[in-house]
Image: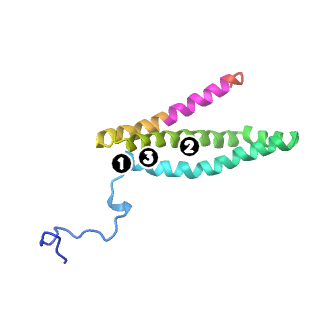
Amino acid sequence: MTKSATGRAPLRPRPISPHLQIYRLIPTMAMSIVHRITGAALYFGTLLVVWWLVAAATSQAQFELVNGIFGSWLGRLVLFGYTWALIHHMLGGVRHLIWDTGHGLGKRTSTRLAWATLIGSVTLTFIAWIAGYVARGGF
């Protein structure tokens, strides 16, 4: 057993490399993981936006095909997920921006910001979709 800097042997051996099995999942950790996942998902979603724009620029038939796919229940589910990922990633970025100013770094405040990111993203996603449906003339 090796000795620590104080010259005494540690009470229990420390792991060689930290891993997720020794950490308890906390809201800030979960939101950090989700922030990374939503960032990766936005690449896929942006390809869908590009596909829609290219179809709009190509022909009426291509545009109707893409609109038909996006208008299906599966297409709307994917677009709903893309909307949530976009809003959640944005709010996560705002949370990091707040931390960059040196504010909100306390345990209690950072946990509240993590919950606010999740609750805010779900709420704003529903508001955006409801507003979209209302603007189109109903559900």
Colouring scheme applied when the structure was drawn = rainbow
Numbered disc 3: secondary structure: helix
Mark 3 and mark 1: span between their CA atoms? 9 Å
Q: Position of residue 35 (x, y in %)?
A: 49, 48
* Residue depicted at 40% across the width and 41% down the height: 114
Q: Amino acid at mark 1?
A: Ile
Image quadrant in which the N terminus is located: bottom left
Identify residue for label 3.
31
Whether the residues at callouts 2 and 3 have beta carbons within 8 Å, the answer is no
Q: Looking at the rendering, which quadrant does residue 128 occupy?
A: top right
**Residue at the (57%, 41%) spot, across then down:** 86
Mark nearer the viewer, 2 or 1: 2
Disc 2 packing (10 Å; few <14; some 14–19; many ≥20): many
Residue 139: x %, y % from top left: 68, 25
Q: Which residue is mark 1?
A: 26
Q: CA distance from mark 2 to mark 3?
A: 12 Å
Q: Which residues are magenta?
A: 121-134
Q: Is residue 97 above or below residue 133?
A: below
Give the secondary structure at mark 1. loop
- Residue 85 is marked as 2
Residue 89 sits inside the magenta stretch: no
Q: Residues within 10 Å of mark 3 (few under 14, many from 20)?
A: many
